Amino acid sequence: MIQITKGFPEDQRATVAALYWEAFGGKLGKVFGPDARALRYITQIMRPDHCCVAIDPSGRVLGVAGFKTPEGGFVNGTSAQMQAVYGWFGARWRGFALWLLAHEVDNENFLIDGIAVTRAARGQGIGTALLEALCQEGQARGYASIRLEVIDSNWRAKALYERQGFVVGRTDRLGLLGLVFGFKAATTMLRPL
């Protein structure tokens, strides 16, 4: 039986980072790449107190769902952490590109900071279980709704979110930033808690 827990076991940090990169490398590859540096950076900055994970009976992580709070996000490093991996110049342009993509604060909605499920475990209800865990976390924190962003090319995730009661809000086009991030638009979706 799959168990959903808050946080991840520290000995699974590299596995969780690889899972996150597998899911989001296509979207973030030009900014965080090359792969080895991206994995090093993500492994260092992940916050276990800002995620839920799905673990199988053998202790293997099958999925992760991050969230954001006023204290930070699941994958949200500092300038110093970025500079340690990418150097001064690399950290500056990457930080600026990320700021252009997402720098808003939402105090009304509980924010999802990415959901990833291993390829082998997709279609088994793990994404749904992780979404439900995030909804419970948002409720426990006193939020009335939960919010996520889904990119235009991820129709499978969008369909899952709609089945789980998320409603399409606005769609933001990236314009020239689409060349950097590998997608053209992101749609905001909300669900009451």
Image (cartoon, helix red, strand yellow):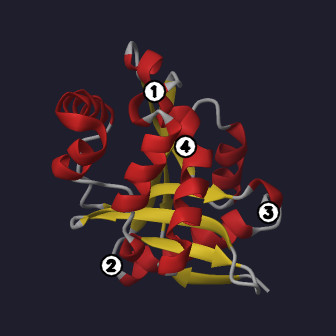
Give me the residue at 32% from left, 78% from top.
142
Q: Which residue is mark 2?
A: 142
Q: Which residue is mark 4?
A: 24
Q: In the image, 124: left or right of 68?
A: right
Does residue 89 lie above or below 164 as drawn? above
Residue 102 picture location, percent across and down? 31, 39
Asked if disc 1 and disc 2 are in contact, CB closer than 8 Å, the reply is no
> Which is nearer the N-term, disc 3 or disc 1?
1
Q: In the image, 170: left or right of 126?
A: left
Q: CA distance from mark 3 to mark 2?
A: 31 Å
Q: Which residue is mark 1?
A: 30
Does residue 6 lie above or below 77 as drawn? below
* Amino acid type of the residue that numbered disc 3 sits on in the rendered structure: Ala
Q: Nearer the viewer, mark 3 or mark 2?
A: 3
Q: Which residue is mark 3?
A: 121
The image quadrant that residue 67 belongs to is: bottom left
Q: Around disc 2, counting alpha carbons within 10 Å, would you say few (fewer than 14), some (14 to 19), or many (20 or more)?
A: few
Q: In the image, 121: left or right of 66?
A: right
Q: Secondary structure at mark 4?
A: helix
> Which is nearer the N-term, disc 1 or disc 2?
1
**Which quadrant of the figure contains the N terminus?**
bottom right
Q: Nearer the viewer, mark 3 or mark 1?
A: 1
Q: CA distance from mark 3 to mark 1?
A: 27 Å
* Amino acid type of the residue that numbered disc 1 sits on in the rendered structure: Lys
